[in-house]
Image (tube, helix red, strand yellow):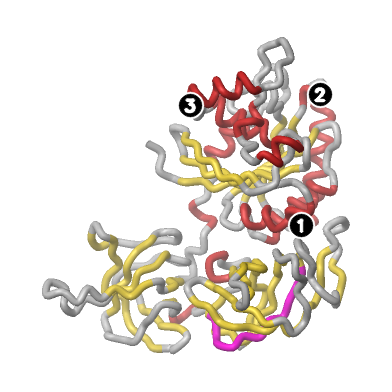
Amino acid sequence: MATELLRLVTCGSVDDGKSTLIGRLLFDTKQILVDQLEHIETTSERRGDGYVNLALLTDGLRAEREQGITIDVAYRSFVTPRRRFQLADAPGHVQYTRNMVTGASTADVAVILLDARRGVVEQTRRHSYIAAILGIPHVVVAVNKMDLVDFSEGRFEEIRGELARLAEQLGVDDLRAIPVSALRGDNVVEGTEAMPWHDGPTLLEHLETIEIAGDRDLDHRRFPVQWVIRPMSDEHHDYRGYAGQVGGGVWRAGDEVVVLPSGRRSRVEAVETADGPLEAAVPGMSVTVRLEDDVDVGRGDLLADPDAAPTVARELEARVCWMSERPLEPRSKLAVKHTTRAVRAVADELLSVVDMHTLDEIDRPERLELNDIGRVSLRLSDPLCVDPYAENRATGAFVLVDEATNETVGAGMVLEARA
């Protein structure tokens, strides 16, 4: 049984065949139940040649089915002998930028679809930009509908050149293009004889072999405390453990530790799970940390490496994706939820907004509207322990909440922090 989980987000323009591609991945990896397949076969638009509309596997919302587009973020899981996959299917429309940001925020890989006939279009640039600002380490571009350009090597190379220039412009280090035909299944799960000039892997083979172990921040120890465990039983009378998910670095017994924001110091006595002590814990693992000293630690505190501590910040400059119908204006009051801590904040200044058509930054906007992405300066009521998002996605990300309605109104990525 494969144990390593790869999180991927799929995105692409309307009608690029994204739902068909996901359906093909599920169909060809035998992840579909027999009754599901029978239902799809009976509801497929028949073309008289046994055609099965694989897009129906993923288009769950009635509004999507009626319009033939993807609106919300749908999550699917599938397993191969080599790896487990969790797939977030994000919408393509520009008015659903917030949905894509949501789906992409935890992804290891972005799979961007484009139509081989149309090549790199505005949507491709926008999705690549969002993948870049969200720090998704690996980007795969599935150049779809190769059957409609006669499986032309020349056309594929032309698109690959455009993508290389786009990757350089956006600072994307690992961008790979793979020619596919989702409708026919060419190069998705199985190889194809239709493109003998392609000597690389199929899409699934590439996804199975991407190295993701080194993508997480292993250099800076970060542990947001989610829960303080005090059993108060006779058996564990003096037990005090701090439960949470490792946000960065490798945690071992004997490590020096600083408790933030208080600045108190101690040493790790043990790193444990319900099954007992661990030799080491790495990012993504949920564990309990015990300290040698009985220091005051509570939910919302951060345990960190004293020699490479995060910034204890009162002011943030961040990139924000605005997710509310009510626009963000200067001096707006919000709550910031960061790791396990929540503080109040004021949006001091709107520094810029991205023109999603050109990807240019426009200075000093009056407001951020729904789906806008901009740079915002925030002043905090209490300190937060943050890293730049580019260094650590766990301690560099936050959400903005409207305190009056408790609605999540924005997603933020720390660019700079000041004490």
Q: Which of marks 3 and 1 is in front?
A: 3
Q: Tell whether 230 sits left or right of 66.
A: left
- Residue for point 54% across, 70% down: 395
Q: Is the magenta stretch mostly helix, strand or loop?
A: strand
Instruction: Say the numbered circle drawn on residue 148.
Output: 2
Q: Which of 8 and 199 is in front in this view?
A: 8
**Tag count:** 3
* Residue displayed at 63% across by 83% down: 345
- State left or right for residue 18 relative to residue 336: right
Residue type beneath disc 1: Leu
Asked if one can make out residue 411 in the rendered structure from this viewpoint, the answer is yes
Residue 201 seen from this side: no
Question: Which image quarter is the C terminus in?
Answer: bottom right
| Magenta stretch holds residue 403 | no
Mark 3 residue crowding within 10 angstroms, few (<14) / some (14–19) / many (20+): few
Give amino acid for label 3. Leu
Q: Label 1's element?
A: helix
Residue 385 vertical placement versus 29 (above, below): below
Q: In which quarter of the image is residue 314?
A: bottom right
Mark drawn on residue 33: 3
- CA distance for labels 3 and 2: 30 Å
Q: What stretch is highlighted in magenta?
A: 374-384
Q: In which quarter of the image is residue 328?
A: bottom right
Q: Residue at x 78, y 35 (%)?
A: 15
Between the C-alphas of marks 1 and 2, the distance is 29 Å
- What is the x, y in percent for residue 32? 51, 28
Q: Which of marks 3 and 2 is nearer the N terminus?
A: 3
